[in-house]
Amino acid sequence: MGSRAVNATAPDGVSQGGDVNRKLLLPARLGGWLAASAAMAIGVPAIAVALAASPAAPLAAASGAAVPAIVPRPVSATAGPGRFTLGRSARIVAAPGAGAAAERPVARDLAAYLRPATGYPLPAVAGAPAAGDIVLKIGAPAALTPAGRAEGYQLVTTASNATIVAPTAHGLYNGVQTLRQLLPPWINSATVAAGPWTMPAVTITDYPRYPYRGIMLDIGRHYESPAAAEQLIAQVAAYKVNVFHLHLSDDQGFRLAIAGFPRLTSIGAAGSVGTGGRTKDPGGFWTQAQYRAVVADAAAHFITLVPEVDSPGHDNAIIMSEYGDAGNHALPASPHGINCGQSDPPRWDYTEDVGYSALCPASPDTWAIMTAIIGQLTALTPGPYYDLGGDEVPASLLSPARYARFVNTEAGIVGQHGKTVMGWADIAGPGTTPPPGSVAEYWQPAAGDSPGTETGREAVAKGMKVVMAPADHAYLDQKYVVNSHGSVPASLGMNWACAAGCDVSSAYNWDPGSLVTGVTDRNVIGVEGDMWGETVANISDADYMVFPRLLALAEVAWSPSAQRTASGAAYRDFLRRLATQGARLQAARVNFYPSAQVAWPLAAQGATLRATRDGHVHGTVATLSAPGLSASALTMCDSSLGIGCTINWGDGTSATGDVAGANATDTRVNSLYAISGDHAYAHPGTYHGVVTLSAGNAAPVTADFTALWR
Ligand code: TNX
């Protein structure tokens, strides 16, 4: 992507953001794991099989007992005897205790998670629990260390109850996310599924390694609606992500209505990357009411929204909007003075280029605009952070001194509004004076003390906290590992940080507290996955890039530090647990890339069929999840291909079923498959049938179904 390179180096050799030219950043250290994964990447994805009855493949816990597969991996989990069955009469009980008020909303959340698939009423009530209930209680389990109390929880399931105890509502909510993963994957279905809804008995004590576990969505390059943002929020909350960083503005689009500056959206929001003459991709923006609603929706998922209006670079949309706004009395000088970009007058550039725009630090109009944006956005945002961006301003546009003056002025305004300054780690460069405790987001795909890493050490030296988002591990817009057909996906994503692809392995196998020399867990507050928007035109595309890699990042951010290497035990353990998430994601209708690095198991769920008056049944007997199984769905039941689906009708007869579904595309996972059949029973009754499914060399998976003729 040569055209995207930033000329970040000044003639005198000084630069913002380290001596980093994105084009040159193809880290040699990626080579090792690429070789190891190449074999898997070529040919059909590996398919392993797990029985439907044990959707969460058991893992050996420290004790040697089997504990269920949960992502992110809990701090400790010990299996107990038996299983808990969630039945039709179960209630979700906020146990009387210190914080019944805090428990109630989480109880309602849990009920809302469990009702669609179970079809059970699951009333959320206060009071004393009975056998069969799920119990939520504010309290302080002794096993939680003081550090673990803010978001930690203990979850105990026995044959009679499932109980979550946590010091905070957020901790309860985290426990709820774990509880969902103890149930079969079909608990994520939007429509009633057959069950049974059982979970293994287990004692889990859990709390996060880092307080900041984020995802960033760039709606500047391509517009995404509030509804799309909320869909992503709901999806990532399931993996205990607690920060939603919203990149609201970039060269190609400004996406939030700002009172007093209507041109920011009438002009600034009208395009997107790829817009040609504004006839394609019409852009868009959020009203302040819509923004507030997304903030509230995030908060309901215990997610803090961090707004970002990138500056002083990545600002062509602002400059194009305001350059000609001479009639605006809010601008004290001449608005032409805001433009320190490459061309004057400024021009739209709807390519993926970066590094050509800059707001001028000396213009009073620049600050009239920025003050309005920051004032309104901070007032709309209850969270502690305001992200001022600060990345990739070539020293040829703003000298380091002028860049630093810009950042320092803006940081002062942010501080006046009571917010903590956040920005890309470039803001830690020469001459900046961020208030101690400000947050630098480290993005360079560089480790140790190699070029680019100095931004991390500069941040530490200035007393800043660090969010780790090294592009070769955490940039979710990077293409996956190339396979025999070429780039993956061919039509989406970039490859500047990972020339041969960034897959699950690179998202997982790194350590935020030791990646960069001089940046340790004393400084690091968390991890963020960044979904840049140049190449993704809708939220389904974004999901395809976000999942499953975000699950790796969520674990790196949540779970205790581990020796994470491409050949190590921690990664193997993660892959096994990640594999079981495939059916969960499919049941939740989350689009994802069925990475060839993961041995996605088959998982199947039986249905209930009703016979006609003459004993005829016809229709879906089971639903099959087989991520990455790209053999044409319609030939799956052809045993000559080694893929079989046999329906045992429960009356002593068997037949081959039919399979229907959609194959994978370049940007969509293959659909769930419906296995169907036709049968005539001889006598009225309740029949217990079994569907047996197999693919390749894998052992079969079975699903029980029921046929009723009354
Ligand atoms: C880098 S590094 C960017 C974004 C791009 C992204 C594409 C940094 C803070 N910014 O402007 O969208 O690469 O991968």
Image (spheres, rainbow, N blue to C red):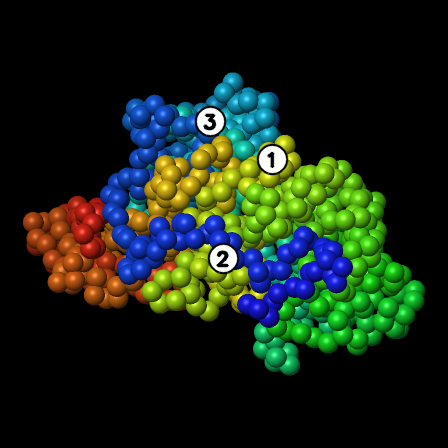
| Label 1 SS | loop
Packing grade of label 1 (10 A; few <14, some 14-19, many >=20) is some
Nearest-to-viewer mark from 3 and 1: 1
Q: Quadrant of residue 187?
A: top left
- Disc 2 marks which residue? 498
Q: Position of residue 432 (x, y in %)?
A: 79, 47
Q: Residue at x 60, y 35 (%)?
A: 520
Q: Which residue is mark 3?
A: 205
Distance between mark 2 and mark 3 Cα atoms: 36 Å
Whether residue 386 appears in this view of the structure is no
Residue positioned 79% across, 76% down in the render: 345
Q: Are marks 3 and 1 in contact (CB under 8 Å)?
A: no
Badge 2 or badge 3: first in the primary sequence: 3
Q: Disc 2, disc 3: CB below 8 Å? A: no
Side of 481 relative to 391 (left or right): left
The percent position of residue 481, horizontal first and vertical second, equals 41, 58
Residue 669 in view of the camera = yes
The residue at the point 60 percent across, 30 percent down is 150
Q: Which quarter of the picture shows residue 222?
A: bottom right
**Label 3 sits on what residue type?**
Thr
Quadrant containing the N terminus is bottom right
